[in-house]
């Protein structure tokens, strides 16, 4: 990419971060300051899983944008430096703890908006990709993953 398109992408990321931070305030989550460069590095950095979510996917979906911003915020709260290696250089317990906080916040946001379709779909993905088929899930965090599934399944039932 050339310098002009790089700046355009960083401007777009900046705009999406502002919108996501505003959405997060509505569910009572205060995100850390995340620069567009940190967000870009996090989304395009090294990972240990087979996640195929792209930066474009995230920028095009308010729920996933909220999710990723919470993940980054949680890692920053743990004192992690956000760069292209933060996922591979951090303990898996830190990565999954941040992911679970992001999943809970994303699901809360979707339910607050009345989007039970999205919440059901993401909860199904959580069950399939984390609980049923994730060899990297630290065993000590399995109860937290199960608790998220159980609690949000009940919340979704009460919304429908």
Image (cartoon, grey):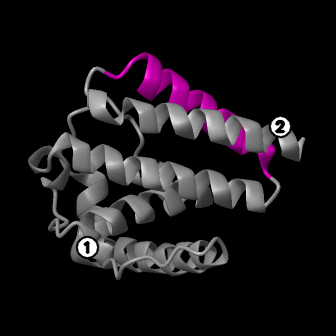
Q: Residue at x 63, y 33 (%)?
A: 150
Residue 47 painted magenta = no
Observer-nearest of 143 and 99: 143
Question: Which residue extends farthest top?
Answer: 132
Q: Is residue 130 magenta?
A: yes
Q: Local crowd at mark 2 within 10 Å, few (<14), some, or many (≥20)?
A: few
Q: Is label 2 in a helix, a strand or a loop?
A: helix
Quadrant containing the C terminus in the rendered view: top right
Quadrant of the image occupied by residue 140? top left
Residue 38 place in picture, x, y as percent: 25, 70
Label 1 crowd bin: few (<14), some (14–19), many (20+), radius 10 Å? some
Q: In the picture shown, does residue 46 fall above or below 32?
A: above
> Camera-side residue: 68 or 27?
27
Q: Which of marks 2 and 1 precedes in the sequence?
A: 1
The answer to whether the residue labelled 1 contacts the one labelled 2, judged by CB atoms less than 8 Å apart, is: no
Q: Is residue 144 above or below residue 35?
A: above
- Report the residue at 65% width, 40% height from top: 151
Q: Quadrant of the N terminus?
A: bottom left
Above or below 18: residue 132: above
Q: Position of residue 45 (x, y in %)?
A: 20, 51
Question: In the rendered picture of this protein, how many numbered marks are placed on residues?
Answer: 2
What x and y, as percent, mark residue 76? Answer: 25, 70
The residue at which mark 2 appears reads as 157
State the image coordinates of residue 67 (x, y, percent, origin top left).
49, 56
Name the residue at 59% across, 34% down: 149
Q: Residue at x 33, y 77 (%)?
A: 34
Which quadrant of the structure image shows residue 152? top right
Give the distance between the C-alpha atoms of the residues marked 1 and 2, in whole angstroms: 39 Å
Main secondary structure along the magenta-highlighted residues:
helix
Tag in front: 1 or 2: 2
Q: Which region shows up in magenta?
A: 115-134
Q: Which residue is the site of mark 1?
A: 37
């Amino acid at each position: 990419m050339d310098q002009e398109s790089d700046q355009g992408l960083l401007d777009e990321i900046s705009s999406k971060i502002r919108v996501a931070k505003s959405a997060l305030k509505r569910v009572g989550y205060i995100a850390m300051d995340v620069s567009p460069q940190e967000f870009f590095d996090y989304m395009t950095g090294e990972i240990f899983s087979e996640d195929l979510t792209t930066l474009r996917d995230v920028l095009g979906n308010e729920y996933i944008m909220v999710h990723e911003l919470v993940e980054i915020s949680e890692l920053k709260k743990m004192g992690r430096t956000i760069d292209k290696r933060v996922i591979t250089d951090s303990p898996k317990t830190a990565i999954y703890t941040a992911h679970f906080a992001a999943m809970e916040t994303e699901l809360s946001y979707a339910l607050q908006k009345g989007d039970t379709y999205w919440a059901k779909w993401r909860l199904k993905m959580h069950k399939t990709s984390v609980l049923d088929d994730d060899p990297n899930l630290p065993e000590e965090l399995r109860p937290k993953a199960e608790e998220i599934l159980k609690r949000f399944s009940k919340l979704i039932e009460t919304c429908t």
